[in-house]
Amino acid sequence: MNAILPKSLDDFWAVVVYESYGGGTRLLWSPEHHDWLPSNAYGSGFVRMPVPGYEGRPYDDELSGAIALADELLRRRICQRCGLSDLEDHFVAPDVFGTAALYCLQQPDPRVVSSFGGTGTRKHWGSRLGCASVRAKYFTDRDNERYVDYGEGLVASHVRDWEWCARCTGAAGNVACNPEVGDRSPWDYVEEVEGKTHIRRYPYAL
Ligand SMILES: [Zn+2]
Ligand SMILES: [Zn+2]
């Protein structure tokens, strides 16, 4: 039982975090059981009922990150990406760096894509820094602005249920260790790297 957690976790559509023992197990918060449901050992998704005796818990910083994302959305009153304000229209899951990130239920994030061709049940990083399963399509608009499209962002259920591709998280890990990132968020560094190409991302990811 985990009765001390704030109610905001119950109000999200879903909350997924990594389990702190390492090994890549993910945990889905169950408002019904007030407990963490571990990801299935094989395939995607999570067990449906709490596992007796299972004591896996999230990393503290991911958990506090999820709570902070709820607080921030409630304070702003509106999500700048989807325009909705309720926690139930949003969910939290680890981004490619393993940090708790806010996702919109009805507005896919183009930084989370399937493999080229759509096979497999892994999340890939929609970025030029992603693995070879991520294919970029380039095009130029009428104003000669160049764009790159890594494919549609995955639907919410897949972002919740699928694990990250190990090659993409490995690439992200290399980025995070790069001394040029300094004190910034690695996402700021990625934006800088992508910005240098003068090729805009389509659709634009906030
Ligand atoms: Zn939103
Ligand atoms: Zn990948």
Image (tube, grey):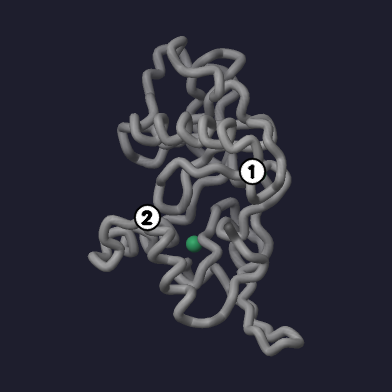
**Mark toward the start of the polypeptide (1 vs 2):** 1
Classify mark 2: helix, strand or loop: loop
Q: Can see residue 176?
A: yes
Q: Residue at x 61, y 29 (%)?
A: 12
Residue type at mark 1? Cys
- Residue 74: image quadrant is top right
Q: Image point 51% across, 61% down: which residue?
A: 125
The extreme left residue here reads 179
The percent coordinates of residue 110 (x first, y second) are 62, 60
Nearest the camera: 201 or 127?
201
- In the image: residue 186, left or right of residue 131: left
Check contact, mark 1 vs mark 2: CB within 8 A: no
Residue 67: x %, y % from top left: 47, 29
Q: Which residue is mark 1?
A: 79
Q: Residue furthest front?
A: 76
Residue 43: percent from left, percent from top: 56, 42
Query: Does the residue tagged 2 have its C-beta within 8 Å of any atom of ligand 1?
Result: no
Asked whether residue 114 is in view, the answer is: no
Location of mark 2 (residue): 185
Q: Nearer the viewer, residue 195 or 5?
A: 195
CA distance separating discs 1 and 2: 20 Å
Residue at 47%, 49% (x, y): give it: 95
Q: Secondary structure at mark 1?
A: loop
Quadrant where the image shows the N terminus: top left
Residue type pointed to by label 2? Ser
Distance from mark 1 CB to nearest ligand 1 atom below 8 Å: yes
In the foreground, 2 or 116: 2
Q: Is residue 60 above or below residue 173?
A: above
Image side of residue 48 versus residue 64, left or right: right
Q: How many badges with numbers are in the image?
A: 2
